[in-house]
Image (cartoon, rainbow, N blue to C red):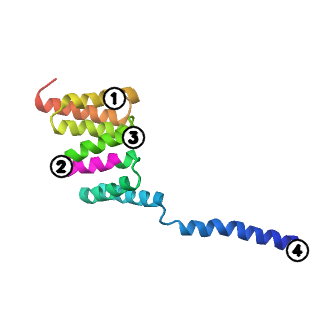
Amino acid sequence: MNLFARIALAAIVAFSAPISAMAAVSDTPVEKVSSAYSMGLEAADSENWKLAVVHFTEAVRLEPDNADAFNMLAYSQRQIGDLESAFSNYEMALAIDPRHEEALEYLGEAYLLVDDLDSAVVQLEKLDEICDGDCEAYFELRDAIEEFRAARGSD
């Protein structure tokens, strides 16, 4: 076999292994998590909260250190009125990532649902420390707190 043929054969072997390996990894744990999380986001986008809970529950089962998945699971649970589970899962998200802006915002909003203004303000203060009062999560929670206060006639 001449040198050119050997190089061509080596190239075919070298490049065919990754291609066949990529085809075989369609069910890797990372892809399963990504798929479950993506399907959860799709369900949430269409406000199918019960289905979102199913998918995000699967995502956190497959990847128990995924703060985003715990946050979205909690958010979806909050939307269907399962506040006990939502509080627990927001805390899980924040245990994984104490600086998770959305989890802090959504937890603060959940506190407002149970008339716990003081705890919501604590979440707002944490967001202020993290993003210097200049992030979407801070503005959203600040506005929710202002609306809460206005509806109740409190300072």
- Residue type, numbered disc 2: Gly
Mark 2 or mark 4: which comes first in sequence?
4
- Give the magenta range: 70-82
The reply to whether the C-beta atoms of the residues labelled 3 and 1 are less than 8 Å apart is no
Q: Quadrant of residue 143?
A: top left
The reply to whether the C-beta atoms of the residues labelled 1 and 4 are less than 8 Å apart is no
> What element does badge 1 sit on?
helix
Q: Main secondary structure of the magenta part?
A: helix
- The spot of residue 45 in percent (x, y) is 31, 55
Eye-nearest disc, 4 or 3: 3
How packed mark 4 is, by other alpha carbons closer than 10 Å (few <14, some 14-19, many 20 or more), is few
Q: Relative to 13, is 38 above or below?
A: above
- Residue type, numbered disc 3: Ile
Eye-nearest disc, 3 or 2: 3
- The spot of residue 112 in percent (x, y) is 19, 36
- Residue type, numbered disc 1: Lys
How packed mark 1 is, by other alpha carbons closer than 10 Å (few <14, some 14-19, many 20 or more), is some
Mark identifier at residue 126: 1
Cα gap from disc 1 to disc 2, whole angstroms: 25 Å
Q: Quadrant of residue 32?
A: bottom left
Report the residue at 88% width, 74% height from top: 2
Q: Which residue is mark 4?
A: 2
Mark 3 or mark 1: which comes first in sequence?
3
Q: Which residue is mark 2?
A: 81
Mark 3 or mark 2: which comes first in sequence?
2
Q: Relative to 112, is 63 above or below?
A: below
Q: Which residue is mark 3?
A: 96
The reply to whether the C-beta atoms of the residues labelled 4 and 3 are less than 8 Å apart is no
